[in-house]
Amino acid sequence: MARHIYSCPLRWSDMDAFGHVNNAVFLSYLEEARIDFMFRLAPGDGSPSFKGGSVVARHEIDYLRPLVHRYEPVTIETWVTRIGASSATVSYEVKDADATYVRASTVVVPIDLETGRPRRLTEEEKVLLEQYRDEAPDSEEAVAA
């Protein structure tokens, strides 16, 4: 199984009044990793895949432990847990060598930019996503970690 690896720097402004990264900021981290994944996955070989655009249909996040500001980036591993006809589920772990801070998933729906309507995944997109397919972490383990 292959996972896309994204190194995400932390910003001082990401912290909240409690001295750790605010829960809402994690959505931005996941977005950065997902965009890096989707747009580095196919376009490098001149493929038209994933260039049309997509929208987020759902986010699910398990916050496992607080992440405090530091100068070292965190690693965000990204992979695909489900490929449907007109959507895909992307899963993530935000972590470093010592801990996993967040486990999350996002349902992404490709759209036709001209019509603004959802569209089906192309066969080429499905093949590319399949290269990063793996199972979702056990949900009980995610909450207990």
Image: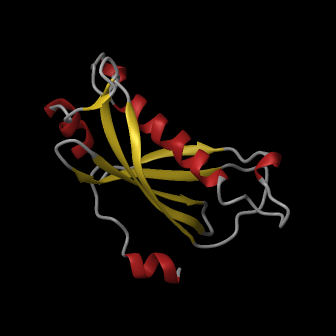
In screen coordinates, is 75 left or right of 39? right
Work out whether 6 lies above or below 36. below
In screen coordinates, is 111 left or right of 31? left
Image quadrant containing the N terminus: bottom left
In screen coordinates, is 50 left or right of 21? left
Name the residue located 77 percent from the left edge and 63 percent from the top edge. 20
Residue closest to the far left: 123
Rendering quarter of residue 118: top left
Q: How many marks on residues?
A: 0
Q: Nearer the viewer, residue 133 or 52?
A: 52
Name the residue located 23 percent from the left edge and 33 percent from the top edge. 125
Q: Position of residue 8 (x, y in %)?
A: 62, 45
Q: Position of residue 18 (x, y in %)?
A: 83, 67
Rendering quarter of residue 41: top left
Q: Position of residue 80 (x, y in %)?
A: 32, 51
Rendering quarter of residue 111: top left
Q: Nearer the viewer, residue 32 or 59?
A: 59
Name the residue located 69 percent from the left edge and 44 percent from the top edge. 9
Q: Nearer the viewer, residue 50 or 37?
A: 50
Name the residue located 72 percent from the left edge and 48 percent from the top edge. 10
What's the image's color scheme? secondary structure
Work out whether 139 lies above or below 30. below
Q: Position of residue 2 (x, y in %)?
A: 33, 50
